[in-house]
Image (spheres, helix red, strand yellow):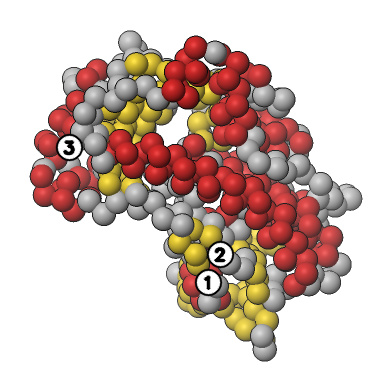
Amino acid sequence: MVLGFLLARAGVDVVVLEKHGDFLRDFRGDTIHPSTLEVFYELGLLDEFLKRPHQEARELTGVIGGVEVPIADFTHLPTHCRFIAFMPQWDFLDFIADHAKRFPSFHLRMHAEVTGLLEAGDRIAGVRATTPDGPLEVRAALTVGADGRHSTVRERAGLEVLDVGAPMDVLWMRLPRRATDPEEPMGRFDQGKILVMIYRGDYWQCGYVIPKGEYDEIRQRGLESLRQDIVAIAPFVSDRVAELASWDDIKLLTVTVDHLRQWSRPGLLCIGDAAHAMSPVGGVGINLAIQDAVAAANLLARPLREGRVTTDDLQKVQSRRTLPTRLTQRAQVLIQNRVIGRVIGGSGRLTLPWPLRLLRRFPFLRRIPARLIGIGFRPEHVRSPAASG
């Protein structure tokens, strides 16, 4: 959606296909980092964007073995917004769609599920889709796969996926929030359990981390057993955990960390999770995808508008974005293997590792994780042209 907006802004004719009738999917990436908020500032949309309902976090906190540890302090970042904004993804996408529709070259088709690719020789020439009105074909000089970690586009294109691996899956759920609860997002680590809690106004969005592939076993133990596990690590929710009334209240996120060896073919490019599925560690996935979109628009808007986009142009997008993607994934894998895997594989009371003891003792060190999470490696800035008139 962001890439479609940026290309339409540059005068490129764009069709965005969305298989659902709306954007209302719960527990999708909704952590809007300072790097993304900076993009909105550069587009002149920041003030209007922040009028939408959201929560802001200027610090990230962890509770490890019962000890509260401030981990990241965003208030010193060299950005216009020194906080993470939490906004449901449907509000985010509706905002982008509303602004993109103001450009006559932007076209959004809902209820349009891509099922295959159109080919002309060795070149991808567009997509096939199903709609309530029947089959649809869209021919295009460039087809962009931005359809997530289970991308139909990349599968149909035969692009090779390299699995990096993840030792965990996540159960997402909501729990009511009381006025006496803390406001800062927090991760709670102890006794073989990890619970991430994100403040969402009148409720907590919670992610309960489980060992990879153990969801069926957890279901067999029963919902009450899961409730007890949650209370064991977050006792203050004991008065409301019963509101998890059925397994329908809990959504499984199968965690995948992978990347494509090659992001493109002639006439086709993958970005975001379709090019590199990210772990939920740090909530960076949506922001890295938007950075891909900004870079792609910067490099491709003019060639597309002039009708001369080449495979070299597409390769430039991958070349630009490979380093930040790989560095981010390596950091995620390090945290998964050294921290998360060890916690969910153990059972006793945790002791505070020395890096966290340093963060607790020296506040200025919290600026380092804040920069890695909030800005990341090689942040992108809007350089795609705005069409005159």
User: Mark 1 — residue?
Assistant: 160
* Residue 231: quadrant of the picture: top left
Q: Position of residue 352 (x, y in %)?
A: 37, 22
User: Mark 2 — residue?
Assistant: 260
Q: Horizontally, is 67 left or right of 285 in the view?
A: left
Task: Residue at 49% x, 18% y: name it.
Answer: 358
Task: Residue at 56% x, 29% y: name it.
Answer: 369
The nearer-to-camera label among 2 and 3 is 2
Q: CA distance from mark 1 to mark 3?
A: 37 Å
* Residue 62: quadrant of the picture: top left
First-in-chain label (2 vs 1)? 1
Q: Horizontally, is 140 left or right of 244 in the view?
A: right
Q: Horizontally, is 98 left or right of 334 in the view?
A: right
Task: Residue at 22% x, 50% y: name it.
Answer: 215
176 versus 163 height, above or below: above
Mark yes or no: residue 126 visible.
yes
The three-letter amino acid code for the residue at tag 1 is Glu
Q: Are marks 2 and 1 in contact (CB under 8 Å)?
A: yes
The nearer-to-camera label among 1 and 3 is 1
Residue 334 marker: none
Q: Position of residue 258 (x, y in %)?
A: 49, 58
Q: Are marks 2 and 3 in contact (CB under 8 Å)?
A: no
Look at the numbered disc 2 and give the secondary structure of its residue. Answer: strand
Look at the numbered disc 3 and give the secondary structure of its residue. Answer: helix
171 versus 200 height, above or below: below
First-in-chain label (1 vs 3)? 1
User: Mark 3 — residue?
Assistant: 226
Q: Nearer the viewer, residue 62 or 175?
A: 62
